[in-house]
Amino acid sequence: MTGSYSLVKPTTWLVRVSAGPSDLTKLFQGLDCVLACGAFEQSVSVVFEGDALAWLTAPSNSEDVTLVSERLERDPIKLLRSLPLYDIAEIFVLDAEKVSLRADLNELTLSPIGGHDFQQLIANSQFTLGF
Amino acid sequence: MRFTLLVNCGPEQTTAYTHAGRLCSALHQAGHSLVRVFFYGEGTLAAHDDSHWLGITAPETERVLCSASAELYGITEAPEGFVIGGLGSLMEAGLDSDRVIQFG
């Protein structure tokens, strides 16, 4: 282990999630980073883009997703629903103006952003990670 | 400048993996400080290639395998020169590094 985790000075992280239903492991990696930021009281912005929007908009009945979820013993939707517990209730969605959130994620707020806003978000973040 | 590397690709993803290794060497040669290499996801499989990473990172560089990823990929014990740690180690980069560079 690496010493004290008392992170007194909040750092601004930006986590980009583009992994779609075909890459559940990557989604978990991204969400785990987001939750770690929340747990260690770091400031974090979350952007869903591309294939990852599928997680927010429609229930996935994909057999692959079910199988991987069972193997990992984790549910991606439950993980998404836990974000507000870490004061992360807003998710930015890139280049998707008319996204309707699936009903079981209604505690989250989706904020559509375009290219310029995204550039600002990156500029205002100290570190950017992508999954 | 102080750097943390996040290696999120396995050795079979040769391009990103090789680039991460080359950057380690380049940072050292340029006089920068590599604080930590955090191996995440498939990157934890890089620990099998431990001699490679021990050779290109300074002794004071922390080489951390993500605990959850290590468990997922069946790594029960950290090889010599590596430690198993949580994502808090990555969060520490916010305090002790000027840049975090991700591979994979």
Image (tube, coloured by chain):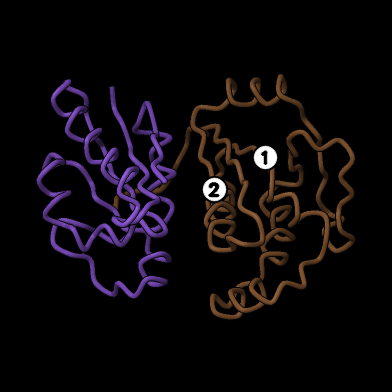
Chain colours: A brown, B purple
Looking at the image, which residue is at 34% across and 53% down?
B39
Q: Badge 1 is on which residue?
A: A47
- Mark 1–mark 2 CB contact (< 8 Å): no
Which residue is depicted at the point 69% across and 54% down?
Answer: A83
Please state the horizontal and vertical placement of residue A72, each as a whole percent of the image.
54, 75
Is disc 1 in the same subunit as disc 2? yes
From what the image shows, is residue A79 above or below residue B98?
below
Residue at disc 1, secondary structure:
strand
Which of the image's four quarters has the N terminus of chain A?
bottom left
Q: Position of residue B29 (x, y in %)?
A: 13, 25
**Image-based side of B28 in relation to A129, left or right:** left
Question: Disc 2 on helix, strand or loop?
Answer: loop
Q: Is residue B29 above or below residue B63?
A: above
Residue B1, given in percent of the width and then of the height, sits at: 28, 22
Instruction: Please give the name of the residue rendered at 29% of the width and 53% of the height, measured from the top-left corner.
Output: B64
Say which quarter of the image contains residue A78: bottom right
Mark 1 vs mark 2: which is more N-terminal? Answer: 1
Q: Sort mark 2 into few (<14), some (14-19) or many (20+) by Cα contacts within 10 Å.
A: many
Q: Amino acid at mark 2?
A: Phe
Badge 1 amino acid: Val
Q: Write down the chain letter for disc 1.
A: A
Q: Nearer the viewer, residue B95 or A94?
A: A94
Q: How far apart are the alpha carbons under marks 1 and 2? A: 10 Å
Q: Chain of mark 2?
A: A
Left or right: where A108 falls relative to A23: right
Label annotation for residue A87: none
Residue, disc 2: A131
Label 1 CA crowd tier, 10 Å (few <14, some 14–19, many 20+): many
- Residue B73 is drawn in which quadrant? bottom left
